[in-house]
Amino acid sequence: AQKVTQAQTEISVVEKEDVTLDCVYETRDTTYYLFWYKQPPSGELVFLIRRNSFDEQNEISGRYSWNFQKSTSSFNFTITASQVVDSAVYFCALSGVISNFGNEKLTFGTGTRLTIIP
Amino acid sequence: DSGVTQTPKHLITATGQRVTLRCSPRSGDLSVYWYQQSLDQGLQFLIQYYNGEERAKGNILERFSAQQFPDLHSELNLSSLELGDSALYFCASSVGSGGDETQYFGPGTRLLVL
């Protein structure tokens, strides 16, 4: 079974600080996919990034960066110079390969509520 | 805007009733997924359809059923509603059916059972 753990339930930081959201996963698939989604107060789920298990290259997109480490089964998300608009619940998710029926679904972590204090 | 639409946005009903939630996927997407988000269970996968056929099933109750129509829109039917069914129900869509697909989520339907 797949599992995603987001140990940080809530984080509060002052605006312009950097913040890292942790994500640890478990899977028996050798090929898998990791995702981050953002859920702002309005409630919708917004896709942020997808990572393939065979590509451990870190990624940066503006103020966002992601650190994928297969050795520690982690896929952490860092926001640099945080802004009030970053306040949201962030979910890490995992999916498997098509050969394992049912693993194509997204298994979500419990989310981290991030509050940016102005 | 993800391109996935869901109606209605809000639904208030009573225990024992039946409701239907509707989802239209992004143009070109063949897969539709349904998820339930509740305070105690978090985000849980319910069911997936691909091009009209059921593809995978999660922790979906027997009181719940879904289908995907020829025009690819999907409906989630919830019957004999209980207080515990109150939740935010999301629909997501993707081009294909594999785990490598990015799922794009609709705005959700917030269901309140009184």
Image (cartoon, grey):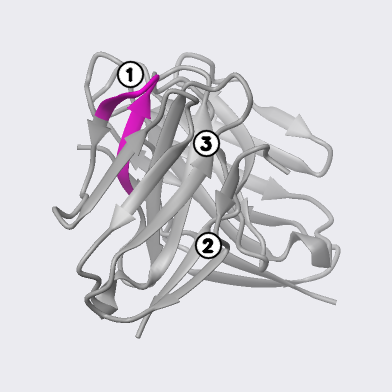
Q: In which quarter of the image is residue A82?
A: bottom right
Residue shown at the point (22%, 20%) measured from the top left:
A100
The Cα atoms of the two marked residues, 1 and 3, are separated by 14 Å
Left or right of B46, for residue B92: right
Q: Could you tell me which secondary element the residue under label 1 belongs to? A: loop
Mark 3 and 2 residues: CB-CB less than 8 Å, in contact? no
Q: Name the residue under label 2.
A: A112
Q: Could you tell me which secondary element the residue under label 3 belongs to? A: strand
Q: Marks 1 and 3: same chain? A: yes
Residue A57 x %, y %: 61, 20
Residue A93 x %, y %: 44, 41
In this view, A9 is above or below A37: below
In this view, B52 is above or below A86: above
Span highlighted in magenta in the image:
B45-55
Residue A35 part of the magenta segment: no
In this view, B15 is above or below B104: below
Number of the label disc, if any, that sits on residue A35: 3
> Could you tell me the amino acid type at mark 1?
Val
Give whichever of discs 3 and 2 has the lower sequence position. Answer: 3
Q: In which quarter of the image is residue B39?
A: bottom left
Return the residue nearer the eye: B90 or A34: B90
The Cα atoms of the two marked residues, 1 and 2, are separated by 26 Å
